[in-house]
Amino acid sequence: MRLIDPDADLEFDPDSVYDGPSKSQKKREVEALQDLGNELVKLPDAQFRRIELPEELREAVAACRRITQNSALRRQRQYIGKLMRGIDPAPIQAQLDAFKGVSAAENAKLHQAEKWRDRLIADNEALTLFLDSYPETDATRLRQLIRNARDEAARDKPPKAFREIFRVIREAMQAG
């Protein structure tokens, strides 16, 4: 009988061998990609048209949006998941997060637009600063909206112009 010396150097150390992710981990990753594909299928039409996708994936998602039969729908979703494995899902996830408004950058833009709106309503000189920063903005329309928003606030009316100013500012920021 041969005894193994515990202090001897082993030629093969089982702890140093890494076979890659476990089967369970691979399955979780595949399911996450399928879930991302399902989010693409459930997008409203306007957002689906705006999102940037590889052509083959766009066609597969568009086909899935038209399918109503359950088993065909399941197969198409699996196919979308398969296509998702061949691409980098991070840009797609970032676009979906932006649509949901979860992106930190998107939140910062919204806060900046709110600050501009508040400054424009409170201070006449803010309009000049805003137009210097975003010269493509329709100055006449923005002046009229600011007057209307001030009037609405004074008369305790619903803030229709207030909201419209925010929309105009956001569009100007996205264009610029």
Image: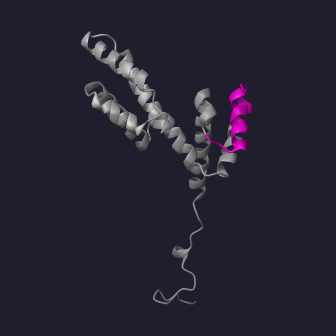
Residue 69 on the magenta segment: yes
Is 147 above or below relative to 73?
above
Q: Quadrant of residue 33?
A: top right
Residue at 46% of width from left, 33% of height from top? 172
Q: Is residue 111 visible?
A: no
Residue 147 on the magenta segment: no
Magenta stretch bounds: 52-76
Q: Position of residue 173 (x, y in %)?
A: 44, 36
Q: Position of residue 10 (x, y in %)?
A: 54, 86
Q: Quadrant of residue 62?
A: top right
Is 146 above or below relative to 171?
above
Q: Main secondary structure of the magenta part?
A: helix
Which is more toward the observer, 119 or 159? Answer: 119
Which is more toward the observer, 98 or 139? Answer: 139
Left or right: residue 63 versus residue 147 is right
Q: Position of residue 101 (x, y in %)?
A: 45, 35
Is 114 above or below relative to 161?
below
Q: Quadrant of residue 103?
A: top left
Which is more toward the observer, 81 or 55? Answer: 55
**How many badges with numbers are in the image?**
0
Colour scheme of this structure image?
one colour
Residue at 39% of width from left, 39% of height from top? 133
Q: Position of residue 29 (x, y in %)?
A: 58, 50
